[in-house]
Amino acid sequence: MQATRFALEQHEIPTHWYNVVADMPNPPLPPLGPDGKPVGPEQMLAIFPGPILEQEMSGERWIPIPDEVREIYRLWRPSPLMRAVRLEQALGTPAKIYYKNEGVSPAGSHKPNTAVPQAFYNRQVGIKRLTTETGAGQWGSSMAFAGQMFGLEVRVYMVKVSYQQKPFRRSMMQTWGAEVLASPTDLTQAGRGILAAHPDSQGSLGIAISEAVEEAAGRPDTNYCLGSVLNHVLLHQTIIGLEAKKQFEKAGDWPDVIFGPCGGGSSFGGIALPFLADKASGKTPNLRLVAVEPTSCPTLTKGAYAYDYGDASGYTPIMKMYTLGHDFMPPGIHAGGLRYHGDSPLISQLVHEGLMEAVAVAQVATFEAGVLFAKAEGIIPAPESCHAIRAAIDEALRCKVTGEPKTILFNLTGHGHFDMASYDRYFSGGLEDYEYPAEAIQESLRHLPKVD
Ligand SMILES: *Cc1c(COP(=O)(O)O)cnc(C)c1O
């Protein structure tokens, strides 16, 4: 029988994360404050612990993973690398298709890979409580789980509309002992301001971030955690690609192209950056690393490479990244995790410099790909993951035309068990494709902050 599962033993969980900054052709640009000067660590220490800030700015290639973190990782890691032979057969392609299954974590996605170390470093510096925001609930559940592992209180500001529409994500967070509030709340100035102006506000990720940051900045025992975009988040996620490299060695194979869904860029960075080192050093110069985003939120494919705020209200430092403008309003698509106006500065720079690529795919086609995958391989993917599956299937179908037996790897970032309402909409024909109009992008790009 042909092997389709390339597993590692628990003792093979990597001992270090990989920091791509050490191998980038040009150093990354620092985030800037309102005065146009690089933001100093003092301002950030109000909401982040020192060890996380050190990682955020580090140029060291390898950063040790604390034993306590590896012990928690053991609950689901190493995650399996699978070869999707039944999908290959269904497509009739000469290509080999592999996927790294990050849906096996307790929260059901890759997000605990960073939630666990973030909780660990906060406890290490004596923090007792963590705040964060969540939209669809993937990040909030991951933080709730991680906080529980290290005995920290977690308060999650959940966008009100999701709080009402995704009650089971909320119960999941409560099971792990977190407190979940429908944002906007009347507990913060940011929340009270919104409620005064819009008593019926359904909330937004931008408002929830403002509430969580405000609370953390105002209490010495409390810090804030972010689930994507920042350098330290991508660093923690490199465990995905580092494991995948060991697994490909066992499989006696190596990818020609890697696809990952891309919202803020953490899981894509996680799978792709460890392979980028070999591409940059000339060992595998032709390896392609492709970020896949929705046509409704085409940050890397249609945005500008410019300094912009990380949040909607202009509260955060500005970062050089691909952006659609911080006041860009994404339409209500079903891949909630891919609706961010910006992207990781590291991924943005690597795309800008031509070391990585990006493609955009339409919503209906992503669900079509997800259902095809579920029928062949059994696993029901998260709507975000369906974006990478679409791109992988398209590549495999091109191989069918050309006869090339390429090796394709994609990141199965999560399962879709809490997203079945979205599948329902797809089955009933209620889903639409939406291409963000170029004029609307031009309009929101007019509001970018001015930088000399
Ligand atoms: C959050 C999420 C994403 C997108 O976030 P990135 O930071 O770009 O990885 C992708 N897939 C799943 C399942 C998610 O929960």
Image (cartoon, helix red, strand yellow):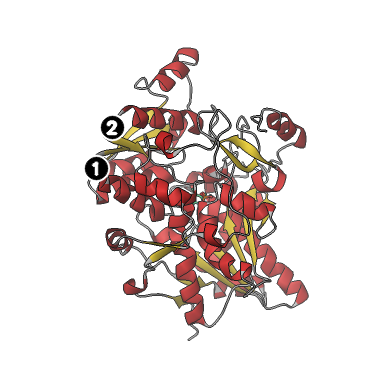
- The secondary element bearing badge 1 is classed as loop
Q: Residues within 10 Å of mark 1 (few under 14, many from 20)?
A: few
Location of the C terminus by quadrant is top right
Q: Which amino acid, by three-letter code, is at mark 2?
A: Pro
Please say whether residue 163 is visible from this viewpoint.
Answer: no
**x and y, in percent, of residue 228 in the image:** 48, 46
Q: Is residue 268 above or below residue 311?
A: below
Query: Which of the two discs, 2 and 1, labels the residue nearer the N terminus?
Result: 1
Disc 2 and disc 1 in contact, CB within 8 angstroms: no
Residue drawn at x 52%, y 62% is: 271
What residue does disc 2 label?
A: 220
Residue drawn at x 74%, y 33% is: 442
Q: Which mark is residue 126?
A: 1
- Image quarter of residue 108: bottom left
- The secondary element bearing badge 2 is classed as loop
Q: Which mark is residue 445?
A: none
- Image quarter of residue 94: bottom right
Q: Residues within 10 Å of mark 2 (few under 14, many from 20)?
A: some
**x and y, in percent, of residue 165 in the image:** 44, 35
**x and y, in percent, of residue 264 in the image:** 54, 46
